[in-house]
Amino acid sequence: MANRLNFKRILVYILLLVLFFILIIILNLYFPQSVKNESNRDFLEKSVVIMNDVKQSYPLLNDIDIEIKLVFLDSGAAEAHKLFFSGYEVLLDYDDLKNADEDVLKGLFAHELAHLEDYSSRLWFSMIVFGIKYALFDSYKKEVERKTDLSAIEHGFKKEFYEFRKYRLETGSKSDLESLEENYLSLEEIESYGTS
């Protein structure tokens, strides 16, 4: 009897933990600190054109609307999200990307759209499990990001993706650089991919 009560108590704690993570994810997705204003409107418009150009190489995303939002991100220059009720979005950190040229942005979108292509084939429960594993397990995050890097290259954006990674290594914060080195393909790995 006591074991059964302990099992129920543990199950309730796990459920509360899952609900807590879901709430945090929802709050972060729906209330990012927007930086959209007149001075960066041209950057946003340019980003939409470039993303739509890159999107043509991702057939699974053809019928999916993707919104771009300019925000302040704690880490990284961009994030891709599948939203619970309103589709898909790519968040861009304007401060990190305002000096990026077209090839750099193409490489960025190749990576982020590879994430969205993966998310588009997942059911919601699978997305919740994915998000929890991504947040809790560094080895899983590394596996996901390296697979996404490879997908961007396999979609035909090796040169642009290389330029994006090089740009981030030159402009990223200390924590961004640590994350890039730990979880993503290196410049050498990108350069050597597909060569024998």
Image: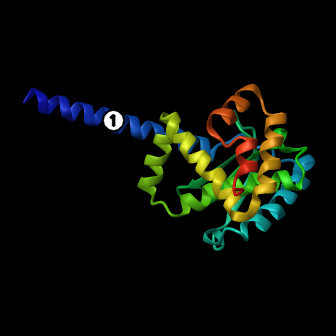
Left or right: where does residue 16 sit relative to residue 173?
left
Q: Residue at x 54, y 44 (%)?
A: 143
Q: From the top left corner, tell me how far across and down residue 128 is, in percent.
A: 45, 48
Compared with residue 186, is residue 52 higher up or lower down, i.e. above or below? below
Q: Residue at x 51, y 37 (%)?
A: 139
The image quadrant of residue 189 is: top right
Give the mark count. 1
Element assignment for label 1: helix
Left or right: where does residue 139 sit relative to residue 172?
left
Q: Residue at x 47, y 48 (%)?
A: 130
Compared with residue 157, is residue 170 higher up or lower down, i.e. above or below? above
Q: From the top left corner, tell me how far across and down residue 92 is, in percent.
A: 75, 47
User: Mark 1 sits on what residue?
Assistant: 14
Position of the C terminus, as image quadrant, is bottom right
State the residue in front, 2 or 191. Answer: 191
State the residue in front, 75 or 143. Answer: 143
The image quadrant of residue 76 is: top right
State the residue in front, 63 or 25. Answer: 63
State the residue in front, 85 or 135. Answer: 135
Tell me the kind of residue under disc 1: Ile
Q: From the top left corner, tell me how far across and down residue 175 is, in percent.
A: 70, 27
Q: From the top left corner, tell me how far across and down residue 123 is, in percent.
A: 45, 60
Residue that lies at the very extreme toward the front in this rendered image: 196
